[in-house]
Amino acid sequence: MRTIMPADRLHLLVPFALPSAAVASTALAGLEYPALSKLVARATLDEQVIGEDFQRTLPHERWVAHAFGAAAPRATAGTGATNGTNDTRGAADDEAPLAPWMLLADGGTPGNATWACIQPVHVRIAHDHLVLIDPASLELTDADAAALYAVAKPLIEELGVRVEAPTPQRWYLSSKEFGTLAGASPLRASGRNIEIWLPHEAHSGQRSRAWMKVQNEVQMAWFEHPVNEAREAHGLPAVNSIWFHAQGTLRPVKRAFARVRSDSAATRGLALAAGAALEAAPDTFRTLAASADNAPRNAPESAPNGAASEEAATLVELDPFSAAYIQQDWGRWNAAFAQLERDWFAPALAALQAGELAELGFTLCGDTGSVTLRATRGDLRKFWRRREFASLFIE
């Protein structure tokens, strides 16, 4: 089996890998994770971002946006040294204007327009409020999504809004009237009262009449649509609304990594725009190592903007946790964590110890904050470093 060459550096981005302190004992019950524990204990802490309860974007969205330069540089509250590490702590901003790059990844052409991503969703009526359910739990087929879009498209365009649907389940809107709207990521709002998460004018906090009109037209057209009648007959939730998020305008990005392995539309779009070699996320570290010698698909021969230091860097985005975390299914989350330890952290640690990997970085995200650590072979010998995994949990 071929292995990653000694010059290579690997960074793992793992959404929803950090439980909150309140549920950590349940989420991690019975688990043993010696490889991750050793890496956490000995690694350099590059950044710990402290999130807030009412941020509209998710930590992994903000991280990838900043890594590639799609968002303004993050301000930090200060830098200090703790146990021989560089510990940069800062409050998380709320910038993740990723829709144009999502559109690019889905096969569209963003151009210079401002775009927002729109997804068909189900909003459930609770006792005295409305709750958004995780879009992934809808089990919406591409055929049904396309049928709903066929009805919605002319209604949206009649209102003077440009709409594109390069994929059935993700649509993109562009309108000058939406230019200052701020929307929340669907997974940020899922399971919660949607009142505070609905799109609003970023500078005034006011609701947009233009957006509400588009939303209402679509909701009415879908109310008795055959797709929804069939879904309800099979015990599935109706697709009864659309969700607005990730609005932004394409801007030049940097090639932060030479290779990107991800299934996320936003990350894939940023990789395409940056000229990185792009492939789907591999199942295991061994799969990644076995393919390390393959020629890049779309990377230029040399890194732009003086990015030579990133020539050997690979970003892998792993997402086994999102659905379980959002649904608070800690048994399922627990099983995914055990598999992550077995398939990624244990073999990556072994490669680092053997000198087959020069550096392993990893960003573990929760619902609001994130932590980024970096380990080299030399770090593993620093036995005096004793950081506990529990110290990373989000309050």
Image (cartoon, rainbow, N blue to C red):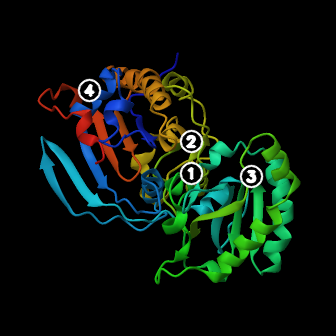
Q: Could you tell me which secondary element the residue under label 2 belongs to?
A: loop
Q: Are marks 4 and 1 in contact (CB under 8 Å)?
A: no
Q: Position of residue 340 (x, y in %)?
A: 45, 27
Tell me the mark number nearer the camera, choosing from 3 and 1. 3
State the residue in front, 20 or 69: 20
Which amino acid type is marked by label 4?
Lys
Q: Helix, strand or loop at disc 3?
A: loop
Query: How far apart are labels 1 and 2 at the CA level?
Result: 9 Å
Residue assigned mark 2: 262
Kindly report the distance in space between the C-alpha atoms of the residues bearing marks 3 and 2.
30 Å
Confirm or deny contact between disc 1 and disc 2 (CB under 8 A): yes
Q: Which residue is mark 1?
A: 271
Q: Amino acid at mark 1?
A: Ala
- Give the labeled residue for mark 4: 38
Q: Earlier in the sequence, mark 1 or mark 2?
A: 2
Find disc 3 in the rendering and name its residue.
Answer: 238
